[in-house]
Image (cartoon, coloured by chain):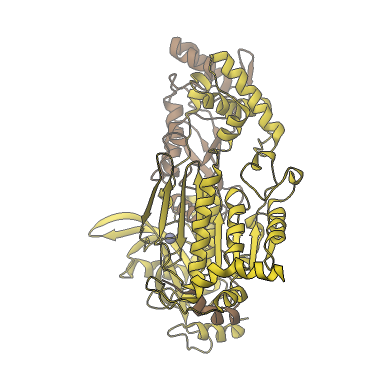
Amino acid sequence: MENSFAEQGRWRDIDNLLSRPGNIVGPGFEPSPQLRQEIGEFARVLVVGAGGLGCELLKDLALSGFPNIDVIDMDTIEISNLNRQFLFRLQDVGKSKAEVAAKRVMERVSGVNITPHFCRIEDKEINFYNDFNIIVLGLDSIEARSYINSVACTFLEFDSEDNPIPETIKAMVDGGTEGFKGHARVILPGMTPCFECTIWLFPPQVKYPLCTLAETPRTPAHCIEYAHLIKWSEVHSGKAFDPDDPEHMQWVYTQALKRAELFGIAGVTYSLTQGVVKNIIPAIASTNAIISATCALEALKLVSGCSKTLSNYMTYNGVVGTHIKVADFVRETDCLVCGPGTLIDLDISTTLSQFIEILGQHPKLLVMKSSITHRGTNLYMQSPPILEEMTRPNLHLPLHELMGGVPDDTIHASGMAVRDGKKTSCLRKLRVKFKGLPDGTTEMGTTSVCKELEPDLN
Amino acid sequence: MINLFKIKDKRLQDAGSANGRPPVKKQSAGELRLHKDISELNLPKSTVISFPNGKDDLMNFEISIRPDEGYYLGGAFLFTFLVSSAYPHEPPKVKCKTKVYHPNIDLEGNVCLNILREDWKPVLNINTIIYGLNHLFTQPNHEDPLNHDAAAVLRDNPRLFETNVRRAMAGGYVGQVHFPRCI
Ligand SMILES: [Zn+2]
């Protein structure tokens, strides 16, 4: 009895939020006392990363009324995580972050079911990601964000007017922190800028000139990078450096220390060595908490409509005082990942070389001398000669056949665009749609038509 | 703004993608940009490119440079390129696989070329790097040394440097270090 009373108390505030109308709610918000339960029935959230942000996110989402959560992380718990990754204890060191985090949250929040996935994000089938309504990212690398972003955009489809089809939009909420700074953003592929549209927001990693490292080190970081980038390969010929191997890290630290002594440089420590080699900026627990809370709230707003969502990129800066700013970035309409691309109708008999001709005449493109790539297969390369020769036999084959007989798909062309007499090199995304397929009714190429066609093609 | 709740019914009945086919991951922005770079390569005469994993893996490739002038005339130098999915945000990793007596390339194959590290910008491309590497052979530079000894000899005694380079390329010792023949 006591328990269920506590349970009701736990959800009181969320239920207030979801059951009352208001004038700053999102479009189409339908408040109801059952809304939390309804969300619980259909909303599936994937949390990517179970580290500093991930621990916070799982706790926040579980307490915000999401009973079905999955979490994916390939990392195991290290002793240095324990100060801020509060779901982990000393006896957990060496165990899977995803598994321990899931277990701990389920112990504390009854009725919540968290499924852990102890693996790399690339290990999952693409379709795994399609099961979720929202993907929440608590990551620290550009590569991982870029990967999840491209997977989420894979599901995105456009109608013949280049508008995104709403049910194919895979919402993402991305959080990130670096010391006292952080960001939270909402990505609705096709509607708001995707990760790739705004990749310039991420400052490139600091890279010191190798000759400075070899010849004139001036800082502790120079000594560490010397040991990591130059000394390692000199001594361990052929053996790759593994930043996750403590023995490797210890070796680099010892060498860096020797180097620092030689040049009279102070300040090389083991944790600085880890920081420089892995490009880690010390994590601040409260920054993670602020950013995660923002992300969890955005996830709740996305599924319920109880308030307008962040539009679309929030930065938090706690270095000097506290400063929060929201920027409304715009989509790159030509984005190769989230953009619609140019729709081109083709006959199934069109050969690759005819297709390349068509791209040169198409009024929206005017791209000459195209090289064509389709899902990782290079169909034709204008250069270098060695690849041109290897791909030349494809030129006289029907494109439909080269693309594996699909009724429509995305394909990319690199070539020279001619605008106002000027040539500029360009890369274009194209949505190819074939006419004259059996059944012959693909005119507008609607979803249902494609579906009906499928059995005939197989 | 999208209301996900509105489309829950649609989603439940529609587990696959909207066109009924299982989705296949698209190429990453980095792979596509690399495709563009490679398809626009305009190699100097001295350079030959090859793709050890075939025409569909552009992320790993090799170039061989045969300098047509300068100290290294007649030699052949192999470089490997490893391009990450964060390209062009991150530069490719380039290593020299031919052991060479050179002030800006160390005996492990690390290359000191500013655009490979501190001066890399996403507007640069593979062609820029290949020209930069060619330049290293026509204009070796004692001011950015990775091989300290070679740099000192180039600075103080260019004639001895030339002799050392010839000896190394022919397959011989410079000081204590042996260099395999690369002519
Ligand atoms: Zn985009």
- Work out whether residue A396 can be spotted: no
Q: Residue at x 49, y 24 (%)?
A: A211
A372 lies above or below B40: below
Name chain A's colour: yellow
In terms of depth relative to the viewer, which is nearer, A400 or A93?
A93
Q: Quadrant of ligand 1?
A: bottom left
Quadrant of residue B158 within the rendered picture: top left
Residue A53 percent across, percent down from the top left: 57, 51
| Total numbered labels placed on residues in the image | 0
Q: Chain coloured brown: which letter?
A: B
Left or right of A384 in this view: A103: right
A167 lies above or below B150: below
A48 lies above or below A77: below
A113 lies above or below B125: below
Residue A345 percent across, percent down from the top left: 42, 77
Q: Residue at x 48, y 17 (%)?
A: B151
Q: Outermost residue, top direction? A: B156
Q: Outermost residue, front direction? A: A2
* Quadrant (top left, top right, bottom left, bottom right) of the C terminus of chain B: top right
Residue A310 percent across, percent down from the top left: 42, 62
